[in-house]
Amino acid sequence: MNCDELQDAFELYALGVLEDEERGEIDTHLARGCETCQGRLREALALNALMLSSTPATVPPARLKRRVLASFGIERSGWGWLGAFAAALMLMLALWLSVQERRRASELAEARREAIQIGADRDRLLQAFAFLNQPETKQVVFGAGQPQPPHGNIFVNPSSGVLLIGANFPALPSGKTYEMWVIPTKTSSPRPAGLFQPTAQGGAMHILNGPIDSLYAVAVSIEPEGGSQSPTQVILVAPVSGA
């Protein structure tokens, strides 16, 4: 097992309540000198000590003692070992529940992120299909015949906007993003048209919604992650005049 698979087991390991097989796996892992897991074990030991020290001592009423002991066939008035055993069981239960709750919260958070991403991707695809199905949508190819630069298609609809669908977009370093630009006429300045990131496979899809009165070309540049007001590193310009 690796460090990530073992991280939730150290509290129970420190209490000595793991099965022999699980304890043996952790013993073997720690024997390799893993500093990360040795640190986690120290944290688990400290947590257990803190919980034990913060558990308030309670003295049950005498009548409750007698009833509990009598239910087990024990006729004695002292609480002794039975109280300590019950406290230890409660501590182990609390630790186990804490581990399970953290694991469940992590799984729920990941599922929520995936659901949000799936919903966003679905909405974008539905929007793109609706865009492509409109009869006034025109298509322009960019990067054809070029082995390295991005290539794909730009779809222009005067009433709906501009749709870019491309491939072979290189992954960008942290802090960088792609930005699309629309150039209304041959002599006008580029206007920002939104930021986008490619998929792990280099695919990209970006939509600029809204009417387009005039469009001479569409460009894409690499910009800081917050975008820019004018292009700084242009990687493609696709003329669309007459599309």
Image: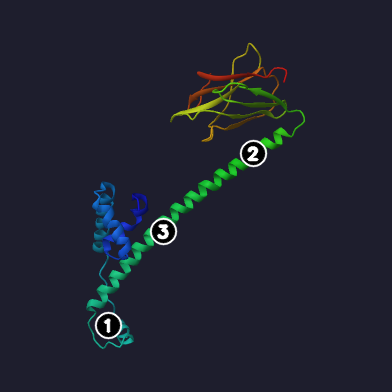
Compared to 101, does 119 lie above or below?
above
Say what amino acid the circle numbered 2 marks. Leu
Q: What's the CA distance linking mark 2 and mark 3?
A: 36 Å
Question: Label 1, on which residue?
Answer: 62
Work out whether mark 1 precedes mark 3 in sequence or the reverse, and give the earlier one: 1
Work out whether mark 2 precedes mark 3 in sequence or the reverse, and give the earlier one: 3
**Closer to us: 149 or 94:** 149
**Secondary structure beneath label 2:** helix
Residue at 64% x, 39% y: name it: 125
Q: Quadrant of residue 203?
A: top right
Q: Nearer the viewer, mark 1 or mark 3?
A: 3
Work out whether mark 1 precedes mark 2 in sequence or the reverse, and give the earlier one: 1
Packing grade of label 3 (10 A; few <14, some 14-19, many >=20) is: few
> Mark 3 and mark 1 in contact (Cβ < 8 Å)?
no
Q: Quadrant of residue 213?
A: top right
Question: Label 2, on which residue?
Answer: 125
Question: Label 3, on which residue?
Answer: 101
Say what amino acid the circle numbered 1 marks. Ala
In the image: residue 89, left or right of residue 188:
left
**Closer to us: 128 or 93:** 128
